[in-house]
Amino acid sequence: MNDIPAYRYGVAKPAEIIQLTGKQILQAIIEGNLPHPPISRTLSFRLVEIGDGFAAFEGEPGDHLLNPMGTMHGGWAMTLIDSATGCAGYSLIPAGAGFRTLETKVNLSRPITCDSAASGPRPTSYRGPARSSRPKRG
């Protein structure tokens, strides 16, 4: 990614985060107090905003993400969406709890190219709301 600050990557130690809510952990990542997960470096995206049931990521397409047809691999977009929706849900989770993606489906309507970021005012972004996988009780 061009013209962005250097980020620290790694995985927080359980002792560092056990007393923090999901939202506090994610905010600490944004602020640089906890490392960004290694997948952020590998796939060129990062968490940029967190709220209650909301997460925003930005990613920059690049040559390292191209499929054989010269467009971004669909798995990159899927992982970006999965990360945003997962973190949106994580923002609502109490201290000591975690989450896992159970199932995700994405339909892509057009290809993402290396020029996609250059054509807009900022890198490709996805803002994901949280949705529960549990049935509502009534």
Image (cartoon, rainbow, N blue to C red):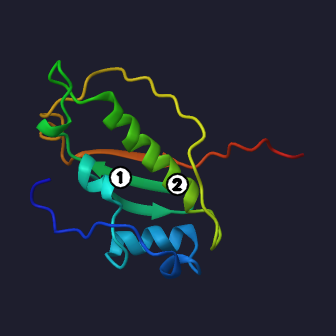
Q: Is residue 50 above or below residue 42?
A: below
User: Measured from the top left, where is residue 137 in percent x and y?
Assistant: 86, 46
Q: Is residue 4 above or below residue 45?
A: below
User: Which of the 4 image quarters holds residue 110?
Assistant: top left
Res. 107 mark: none
Closer to the camera, 98 or 117?
98
User: Measured from the top left, where is residue 6 in percent x and y?
Assistant: 17, 69
Count neighbours of disc 2 (C-alpha within 10 A) and say few if under 14, some if 14 to 19, many if 20 or more: many
Count neighbours of disc 1 (C-alpha within 10 A) and say few if under 14, some if 14 to 19, many if 20 or more: many
User: Measured from the top left, where is residue 13 in percent x and y?
Assistant: 45, 75
Q: Is residue 16 above or below residue 41?
A: below
Q: Which residue is mark 1?
A: 57
Q: Which residue is mark 2?
A: 88
Q: Amino acid at mark 1?
A: Phe
- Residue drawn 32% across the image and 28% down it: 74
Closer to the camera, 18 or 122?
18
- Residue drawn 30% across the image and 54% down it: 40
Q: Secondary structure at mark 1?
A: strand
Q: Amino acid at mark 2?
A: Ala
- Residue drawn 44% across the image and 23% down it: 107
Q: Secondary structure at mark 2?
A: helix
User: Which of the 4 image quarters holds residue 41?
Assistant: bottom left
Horizontal side of 52 relative to 123 (left or right) equals right
